[in-house]
């Protein structure tokens, strides 16, 4: 079984991938990840957004982590289809 988790904040594995020392340890996301990461036959795919110069991907045994560029509220204009910062 595969689970896709989409997070609006990075937690420990994503912070490690981003190379930041920020920690959100103790959050329910961290607890859920710790509970699920060792379930046999379960593949976790975790995605978040963050500021940076490029997207990052890390694949472990049954876990994949993706950091996509973004990280702060954006406004989408349906007339121009361009992204505008708020």
Image (cartoon, helix red, strand yellow):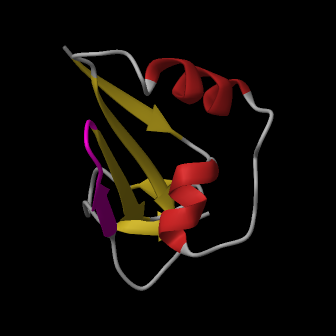
Q: Is residue 31 left or right of residue 47?
A: right
x 43%, y 27%: residue: 37
Give the residue furthest to the bottom.
53
Q: Residue 13: x and y, percent?
A: 53, 52
**Quadrant (top left/top right/bottom left/bottom right) for the C terminus:** bottom right
Can you see residue 85?
no
Q: Quadrant of residue 35?
A: top right
Q: Position of residue 56 (x, y in %)?
A: 34, 69
Identify the residue at horizontal 57%, vertical 28% (top origin).
34
In the rendered structure, the answer to whether residue 76 lies left or right of residue 23 reads left
What residue appears at the point 29 percent right and 50 percent down from the top-left corner?
Answer: 60
Stretch of the chain drawn in magenta: 56-62
Question: x and y percent of residue 73 in the render?
Answer: 58, 55
Query: In the figure, residue 51 lies in which quadrant?
Result: bottom right
Furthest-right residue in view? 26
Placement of the N terminus among the 4 image quadrants? top left
Q: How many marks?
A: 0
Q: Quadrant of residue 67?
A: bottom left
Q: Residue 38 location in percent, x, y?
A: 42, 23
Regarding residue 40, the answer to whether it shows in the image is yes
> Is residue 66 toward the left or the right of residue 24 in the image?
left
Above or below, 46 against 12 in this view is above
**Residue 57 forms part of the magenta stretch:** yes
Q: Is residue 54 above or below residue 76?
A: below
Q: Is residue 2 magenta?
A: no
């Amino acid at each position: 079984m595969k689970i896709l988790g989409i997070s609006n904040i990075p937690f420990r594995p994503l912070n490690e991938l981003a190379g930041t020392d920020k920690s959100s340890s103790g959050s329910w996301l961290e607890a859920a990840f710790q509970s699920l990461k060792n379930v046999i036959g379960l593949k976790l795919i975790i995605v978040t957004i963050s500021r940076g110069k490029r997207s990052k991907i890390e694949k472990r045994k049954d876990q994949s982590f993706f950091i996509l560029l973004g990280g702060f509220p954006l406004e989408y204009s349906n007339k121009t289809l361009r992204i505008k910062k708020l």
